[in-house]
Amino acid sequence: MPLISKRDQEVLRKEFGHLIDPVKMIVFTRKMQCQYCRETRQIVEELAALSDKINVEVYDFDHDKEQVEAYKIDKVPAIVIARGGEDPKDYGIRYYGIPSGYEFSSLVEDVLMVSSGESGLADESKRAVADIAIPVHIQVFVTPTCPYCPLSVRLAHQLALESDYIVADMVEAIEFPTLSDKYQVMGVPRIIFNEEYHIEGAAPEPMMVDRLLQAVEAEKTTA
């Protein structure tokens, strides 16, 4: 049974008609101990079927160690959205957990964004991010029923597109309870910057950039 309805397929097929550069969606799954691996792969493959500019690669977390290490994947299901074609690029855009419910819209927006190569961030934000020269890890904890979470995921992935130093994860909080406990996720979205800095709840772009820069400055002082 398709996970994307026929009506949504038609809408998305029209949206994907505007894709510019090829997009590669890389899925990491495993056969055991992964509740939503099969469904996550199915969603990606159904999306890819709507445009010849979207390609899918699927790897097994337990056996394809070279690819797991290359993309630094540490849990499954996982999705990497990268530029494909003759000039591929991994922007550091990651999904951990099934992108269902409201998060399906994030997945679609990321495909469009990566294909265009344009983050859509304000010029001021782009200038601020351009000065980052140390690694930053952003984790956005979400649930499929949270209507405010896609905005935070979108902003985190926009920041990752703008900087080779940023990796931004969507993390489905219910699927990874140990990680949620570690970061004291009591509500979503909860956004973690390099372990120490966080934002509780949806945040506008200037606040996200400000907290990102705080995390960068903190890393500089401890380096």
Image (tube, helix red, strand yellow):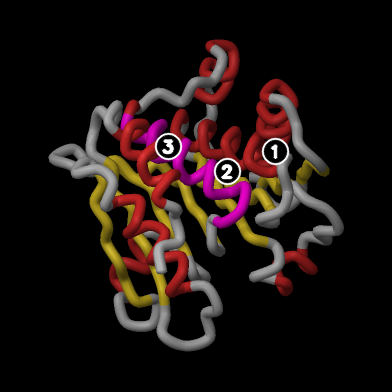
**Sequence-first disc among 3 and 1:** 3
Q: Residue furthest top?
A: 123
Magenta region, main secondary structure: helix
Vertical order, 181 against 161 (above or below): below
Disc 1 residue type?
A: Ala
Q: Tell whether position 107 is magenta.
A: yes
What span is in magenta? 100-115
Disc 2 residue type?
A: Val
Location of residue 58 in the rendering, given as x and y in whole percent from the top left corner: 30, 67
Residue 114 is drawn in which quadrant? Answer: top left
Disc 1 target residue: 215
Q: CA distance from mark 1 to mark 2?
A: 8 Å
| SS at badge 3 | loop
Q: Residue furthest bottom?
A: 32
Disc 2 target residue: 136
Q: Residue furthest front?
A: 7
Asked whether disc 2 touches disc 3, contact meaning CB atoms under 8 Å apart, the reply is no
Q: CA distance from mark 3 to mark 1?
A: 16 Å
| SS at badge 1 | helix
Disc 3 target residue: 164
Location of residue 217 in the rendering, given as x and y in whole percent from the top left corner: 69, 33
Question: Which quadrant does the N terminus fall into?
Answer: bottom left
How many numbered tags mark residues here?
3
Circle 3: is it few (<14), some (14-19), or many (20+) Cα within 10 Å? Answer: some
Q: Tell whether position 75 is magenta.
A: no
Disc 3 residue type?
A: Asp
Circle 1: is it few (<14), some (14-19), or many (20+) Cα within 10 Å? Answer: many
Location of residue 72 in the rendering, given as x and y in whole percent from the top left corner: 43, 62
| SS at badge 2 | strand
Location of residue 64 in the rendering, given as x and y in whole percent from the top left corner: 30, 76
